[in-house]
Image: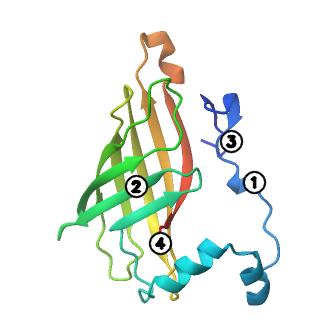
Amino acid sequence: MTTRQRYKGPSGPGSLLCHAAEIPRGEKRGTEEEKETKTKWQLEREQKRPAREGKCDLVGWWENDLGSKMNVSKVDSQGNFSGMYYTAVSSTQKPIKPSPLVGSQHLDEDGQCTFGFTVNWTFSDSTAVFVGQCFAGNEGDEVLQTSWLLREKVSSLPSNWKATSTCCNTFTRMG
C-alpha cells in the first residue's frame, strides 16, 4: 500500500487522497514565528485546554484534516469505547448522517495508546475500520494518527478490486 491511493470521491475521479507524507518538511520554526502563523481559534483552544501531562485520553471531540468529527463518549476499564462519527466526505449521493463507532484501545502506562474502531455508515452500504495511535505532548497537545480501510458494497465479484479504499487521517482534539 502507498500513501498515494486514488479514489472516486467528492473531488472527482482520481483525486489524491493522502498527500501529507509527500509534503517536504522544513526547518523547525521558532516559537514566536509559530505563534504568528496560528489562527485565533487555535490559540484560544490551546489556552482553554489544560495540560494532560503527556497522557492521551480518547474521550471527547476530535476533528480530522478533512473536517470530519467524532465523539468518543466513554472508555471502559477494559479499553472498549463507543461514540459517533460525523463524516465531512462521502462518495455516495445520499445525504450524510451521523454514524456509530465502536472500538478498543490498549490502556498503556505512558498514555500513548494504540487503538482501533469500526464505523458502520448509516447512509451507505459501507464500513470503515480505523487503526491508530494517540500521541500526547507535555503541553497538552493530543494527536491521533490513523490509517483506515473503507469497504464499499459492490454488485459482483469482478467489481471486488475497486471495493476497498485505504488512506490515513490526523485527528486533533476540539476545544
Residue 3 against residue 139 in the figure, above or below? above
71 or 78: which is nearer to us?
A: 71
Q: Comparing marks 3 and 2, which lies closer to the viewer?
A: 2
Residue 98: name its quadrant: top left
Residue at image mark 4: 175
Q: Earlier in the sequence, mark 2 or mark 1?
A: 1
How far apart marks 2 and 1 lie (CA) works out to 26 Å
Q: Earlier in the sequence, mark 1 or mark 3?
A: 3
Q: Earlier in the sequence, mark 4 or mark 3?
A: 3
Residue at image mark 1: 22
Residue at image mark 2: 70
Q: Is residue 172 left or right of residue 30?
A: left
Q: Amino acid at mark 4?
A: Gly
Q: Do the CB atoms of the residues marked 3 and 2 lie less than 8 Å apart?
A: no
175 or 116: which is nearer to us?
A: 175
Q: Earlier in the sequence, mark 3 or mark 2?
A: 3
Q: Amino acid at mark 2?
A: Met
Q: Comparing marks 2 and 1, which lies closer to the viewer?
A: 2
How far apart marks 4 and 1 lie (CA) works out to 29 Å
Q: Position of residue 14 (x, y in %)?
A: 70, 29
How far apart marks 3 and 2 lie (CA) works out to 25 Å
Q: Do the CB atoms of the residues marked 4 and 3 lie less than 8 Å apart?
A: no
Q: Position of residue 171 (x, y in %)?
A: 51, 61
Residue 112 against residue 2 in the figure, above or below? below
How far apart marks 1 and 3 lie (CA) works out to 9 Å
